[in-house]
Image: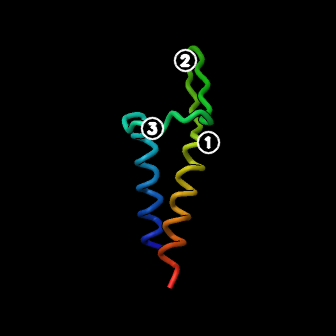
Amino acid sequence: MLVLGLMLAAAGLILMFAERIPGIGRLPGDIIIKRKNFTFYFPLATGLLLSVILSFILWLAGRK
């Protein structure tokens, strides 16, 4: 569970700084709503991409 927690924390940090990493954080499927005093950002495509990548890595690690 410790490793899973660290992986989730790392994924959160990646999403926080995704704007600075080229190609991540502003994918076409990400939802951004900007209003006068409010900005809502939901990284839908970025989250799906990270999920696929992490699933593949864990699948590779689980193979024997």
Please state if 31 lies on the left or on the right of 26 as rendered.
right
Mark toward the viewer: 2 or 1: 1
| Secondary structure beneath label 2 | loop
| Secondary structure beneath label 1 | helix
Q: In this view of the protein, which residue sits in the foreground, 8 or 44?
A: 44
Name which residue lies at 52% across and 78% down: 62
Name which residue lies at 40% across and 36% down: 22
Name which residue lies at 58% across and 30% down: 40
Q: Where is residue 10 in the image (x, y as percent from the top left)?
A: 41, 55
Q: Which residue lies furthest to the bottom in this view?
A: 64
Q: Position of residue 1 (x, y in %)?
A: 48, 73
Amino acid type for the residue under numbered disc 3 = Gly
Amino acid type for the residue under numbered disc 2 = Asn
Please state if 49 lies on the left or on the right of 21 as rendered.
right
Answer with the quarter of the image where residue 34 lies: top right
For disc 2, the marked residue is: 37
Q: Which residue lies furthest to the left in this view?
A: 20
Estimate how packed mark 3 is, as few (under 14), some (14 to 19) or many (20 or more) residues with alpha carbons within 10 Å. Answer: few
Mark toward the viewer: 1 or 3: 3
For disc 3, the marked residue is: 23
Coloured how?
A: rainbow
For disc 1, the marked residue is: 44
Q: Is residue 53 above or below residue 61?
A: above
Mark toward the viewer: 3 or 2: 3
Estimate how packed mark 1 is, as few (under 14), some (14 to 19) or many (20 or more) residues with alpha carbons within 10 Å. Answer: some
Answer with the quarter of the image where residue 45 lies: top right
Which of marks 1 and 2 precedes in the sequence?
A: 2
Which of marks 2 and 3 precedes in the sequence?
A: 3
Q: Do the residues labelled 3 and 2 touch (CB within 8 Å)?
A: no
Could you give the CA–CA distance between mark 2 and mark 1, rounded to whole angstroms? Answer: 22 Å
Q: Where is residue 21 in the image (x, y as percent from the top left)?
A: 38, 39
